[in-house]
Amino acid sequence: MNKKINTLLFILGATLFNIIVALITFVLLMVLYVRLIMDFLPETSRSWGFTIIFIIAIVVSFVAYRFMIKFLLKKVELDKYFDPLFVRRNIRKSQ
């Protein structure tokens, strides 16, 4: 496989990892919320819990993604296996 395919597979894998972590976190927090907390809240404020759980799941997935990237940076030499996503090109204007 060449560097471009490795880069594409890494992006797809990292995105899938991020989505799976967010879903698992969302489901676990939702179960805890419904079983432990929701019965003690008034009906008018129960819906805020779902919004907060959604935001927490996104934050947890972002933090887990950052830890995964830091771990990968320590273990793998990126220039050897991956192609840069954005290439800086020196474009000079005619003077």
Image (tube, grey):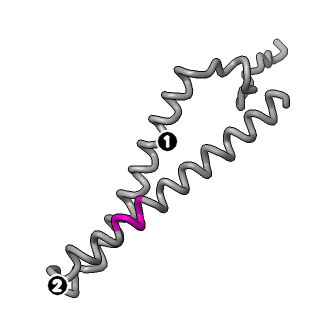
Q: Are marks 1 and 2 in contact (CB under 8 Å)?
A: no
Residue in the picture at 79% in, 15% down:
92
Chief SS of the magenta region: helix
Q: Where does residue 81 sit, x and y in percent of width and height?
A: 73, 23
List the residue tagged with mark 1: 65
Q: Is residue 16 magenta?
A: no
Mark 1 Cα-neighbour bin, 10 Å: few <14, some 14–19, many ≥20: some
- Splitting the image into 4 quarters, where does residue 3 fall? top right
Q: Eyeballing the image, is 68 above or below 26?
A: above
- Splitting the image into 4 quarters, where does residue 14 fall? top right
Residue in the picture at 40% in, 58% down:
57
Q: Which segment is the magenta one?
A: 25-29
- Splitting the image into 4 quarters, where does residue 80 fall? top right
Residue sitting nearer the eye, 59 or 24: 24
Tag 2: amino acid: Pro
Q: Quadrant of the C terminus?
A: top right
Residue sitting nearer the eye, 25 or 63: 25
Tag 1: amino acid: Tyr
Q: Where does residue 17 sit, x and y in percent of width and height?
A: 57, 49
List the residue tagged with mark 2: 42
Residue sitting nearer the eye, 4 or 17: 17
Residue in the picture at 70% in, 18% down:
79
Q: Quadrant of the N terminus?
A: top right
Residue in the picture at 67% in, 41% down:
11
